[in-house]
Image (cartoon, rainbow, N blue to C red):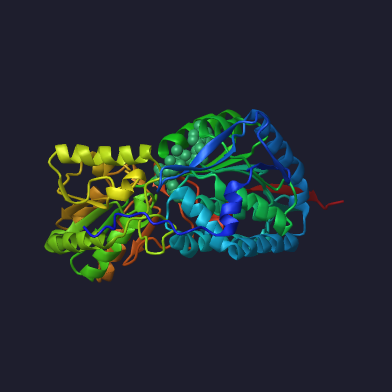
Amino acid sequence: MSIVETVEVKSASKQTTDFLSAQHKLVIGGTAALSTTGETFQTFDPALGKVLTSVPHAKQADVDAAVAAAQAAQPVWQRMAPSERAALLLRFADLIERDTAWISEIESLDSGKPKLHIAAVDIPLGVGALRYNAGWCTKLAGETIPVSSPDMHVYTRREPVGVVAAIVPWNFPLCQACFKIAPALAAGCTVILKPAEQTPLSALILGKLALEAGIPPGVLNVLTGEGATTGQALVEHPGVAKISFTGSEEVGKHIARSASKTLKHVSLELGGKNPNIIFADCDVEAAASVAAGAIFFYSGQVCSAGSRLMVDAAVYDRVVDRVVSEAKQLKLGHGLNADTTMGPLISEDQLARVNGFVEQSRKGGIEVAIGGNRGKGDLASGSFYEPTVLCGADDSASVVREEIFGPVLTIQKFNSLDDLVPRANNSNFGLAAGIWTRDISKAHAAAAAIQAGTIWINTYNQFDAAVGWGGFKQSGYGKDNGREGLDKYLQTKTVWVNYGS
Ligand code: NAD
């Protein structure tokens, strides 16, 4: 395996080192504040296993203050001229784009992901969401409804739902935050952003940049803290109208139960165990190459990862060979190194979980075609895990059924479309799927039959702010992005006017 077993960290920019050495503060009502209890928690560089910095741990009093600030700012933000609200969102997007270089460094240090990928993928997606949704500010039209009662004029107004708590995971911290902030602010809601405890830093940057853009104090508040305390307090707070959540299935279900006590609006973007399907009539080499990227991108810590590769038996060996050869080309290393193509897992806990699945597979007689170990040599001090390919698992194996959230791919054979479809759908999840074929009829038939919120045909992992993203089944409900991503932050008010004498 040609994985370079050294971790060479190039020095970060001055802006990055200045930011890391500063005292970090919550953003509440436009003011930078320590936690009322003074408590903090550490965030780590997972590539080196070292502490990066500490951030405030927001507790109940901080949550109360943030909700009060968001409630106070809401009428002002809602009533602001839509064109002005749009201009502020565009300015916010420009500032994030301006700071791409050092924000990518911070996000890379905090999450372990390659800096170049963050600059090329995460930040443009986040900026794109702000720009796309800025366009909606001036287009939130209601309708007039022709009713049968005489002399009645009925119209609707599209109004913001109120204060939104945006709770996001560690795998795409800035980008997931923007997927929620952008439509919520465009709709006229105010927001409290709670990043994951593993990756709190880019959210704090977003809070500051929103203020620099001129977004009024209290419109975007940022609380760093743990899920069970800060997150749970937001979910239970009667002043929060909506929870927009991206994260695990387990926490999503818990949030839905907790939020039902105050009948909050809830949207859930949860996990996936996504089938990526290669028919023999496609460009097999291209499909296998993209399939490797679909699982190893961000070390497989991606909800849409193509983690279940299902291959027509006629081309199975070719696909396995190509995927293994792509895995050999990956260069594991620190995310700040320009030649790193795969970073570490987010934490030792995550590594232990991933390795547990692989060990269980080994014991069950599943072939490990490549990988299956933590990084060695210099990589051993970080949470690195080798790109791993497992062959010959049957459909009931836990590696085929459960979301591993690591660089572990199962490759299975199928014999026909009829054999494939029930097996591809045999999952609690339904987030995304890939289909590779040159036969247009087969492509459309499979796209219609596969139970997933997104289908990619002869491509994989395509995203756009204009296109809704969200799952079927236990991958959650409510889309991010696109028109549907905006609608979930709006509620419709009906107005009846008697114009008779
Ligand atoms: P997680 O569910 O552990 O945590 C997500 C967020 O929820 C974090 O901010 C966490 O602090 C918070 N949280 C935890 N307990 C909470 C509680 N009781 N109340 C309120 N908030 C709470 O998920 P994770 O490990 O950070 O992320 C990985 C998961 O996210 C994977 O399952 C992945 O598939 C999923 N994900 C889904 C999408 C999607 O678009 N569908 C995108 C990215 C990640």
Q: Residue at x 18, y 62 (%)?
A: 319
Q: Quadrant of residue 330?
A: bottom left
148, above or below 195, in the image? below
Q: Residue at x 82, y 53 (%)?
A: 499
- Left or right: where does residue 188 sit relative to residue 299? right
- Pick the residue in front: 303 or 354: 354
- Left or right: where does residue 239 sit relative to residue 483? right
- Pick the residue in front: 159 or 238: 238
Image x and y of residue 265, in percent: 58, 40
Image x and y of residue 478, in percent: 50, 47
- Pick the residue in front: 62 or 452: 62
Q: Total marks drawn?
A: 0
- Pick the residue in front: 45 or 92: 45
Q: Quadrant of residue 321?
A: bottom left
Locate the N terminus by quadrant. Answer: bottom left
Q: Quadrant of residue 457?
A: bottom left
